[in-house]
Image (cartoon, grey):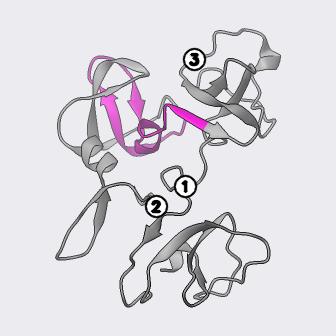
């Protein structure tokens, strides 16, 4: 999934490739369950179609129901059931259909664009706010700030810590560009880098 994560993963000793446990479970042959659907889903790597959650069309590799026309891409299959956003103090829950027929309520309260009521969205019942699935989870939903990573020695000799980038931090030590959102930092030698630059 190429998702930057500090969760458990399997690592191939030969090629050093890591695969997160979420992907191992999702891509293991057999039926999988999904909270948004009553039938089991199977992964079809060669199937092309439309994801019912995000509406993206012509996606190759979908989780499909063999009993009805229900398909999810890997990203939507892996969406967190609840998520938090800085605009709401409560957890937002993943919702699968909007039964509210009042068209003015079909807007994303984060980006303020209209949203398709037939697609999945996040919703806070307490505040009655709704948001696109792409507007809520952060770009790195599986990273915990303050986590320490031991990286390959040729990348950097010390462990690095996941930090929230503050405006006065120096630019990336590898590419020289600013690090937005978060960065990896070595406090021993003032080394700061984008995750993709390691």
Q: Is residue 133 magenta?
A: no
Q: Position of residue 146 (x, y in %)?
A: 54, 63
Magenta region: 55-83
99 on left or right of 37: right
Q: Work out whether residue 120 can be spotted.
A: no
Q: Which is more toward the observer, 68 or 161?
A: 161
Mark sitting on residue 140: 1
- Residue depicted at 79% across the width and 72% down the height: 167
Q: Secondary structure at mark 3?
A: loop
- Residue depicted at 42% across the width and 89% down the height: 157
Q: Position of residue 137 (x, y in %)?
A: 59, 44
Q: Residues within 10 Å of mark 3 (few under 14, many from 20)?
A: some
Q: Quadrant of residue 155?
A: bottom left
Instruction: Looking at this view, name the residue that lies furthest to the front.
Output: 188
Report how many numbered discs are placed on residues in the image. Answer: 3
Circle 3 or circle 2, nearest the eye: 2
Badge 2 is on which residue? Answer: 4
Q: Which is more toward the observer, 167 or 27?
A: 167
Asked if marks 3 and 1 touch (Cβ < 8 Å), the reply is no
Asked if marks 2 and 1 touch (Cβ < 8 Å), the reply is yes
Q: Residues within 10 Å of mark 2 (few under 14, many from 20)?
A: some
Asked if marks 3 and 2 touch (Cβ < 8 Å), the reply is no
Q: Earlier in the sequence, mark 3 or mark 1?
A: 3
Q: Work out whether residue 106 can be spotted.
A: yes
Q: Which is more toward the observer, 114 or 149?
A: 149
Badge 3 is on which residue? Answer: 97
How much space separates mark 2 and mark 1, taking CA atoms? 6 Å
Q: Is residue 81 magenta?
A: yes
How much space separates mark 3 and mark 2, taking CA atoms? 29 Å
Is the residue 174 above or below the residue 108 in the image? below
């Amino acid at each position: 999934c190429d998702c930057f994560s500090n969760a458990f993963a399997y690592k191939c000793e030969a090629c050093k490739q890591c695969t997160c446990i979420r992907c191992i479970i999702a891509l293991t042959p057999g039926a999988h369950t999904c909270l948004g659907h009553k039938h089991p889903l199977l992964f079809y790597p060669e199937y092309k179609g439309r994801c019912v959650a995000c509406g993206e069309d012509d996606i190759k590799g979908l989780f499909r129901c063999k009993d009805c026309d229900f398909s999810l891409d890997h990203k939507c299959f892996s969406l967190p059931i609840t998520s938090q956003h800085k605009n709401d103090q409560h957890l937002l829950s993943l919702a699968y259909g909007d039964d509210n027929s009042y068209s003015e309520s079909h807007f994303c309260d984060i980006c303020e664009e209209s949203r398709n009521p037939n697609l999945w969205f996040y919703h806070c019942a307490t505040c009655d706010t709704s948001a696109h699935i792409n507007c809520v989870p952060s770009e790195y939903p599986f990273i915990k700030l303050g986590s320490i990573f031991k990286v390959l020695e040729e990348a950097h000799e010390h462990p690095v810590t996941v930090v929230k980038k503050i405006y006065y931090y120096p630019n990336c030590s590898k590419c020289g560009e600013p690090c937005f959102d978060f960065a990896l930092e070595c406090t021993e030698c003032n080394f700061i880098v984008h995750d993709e630059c390691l």
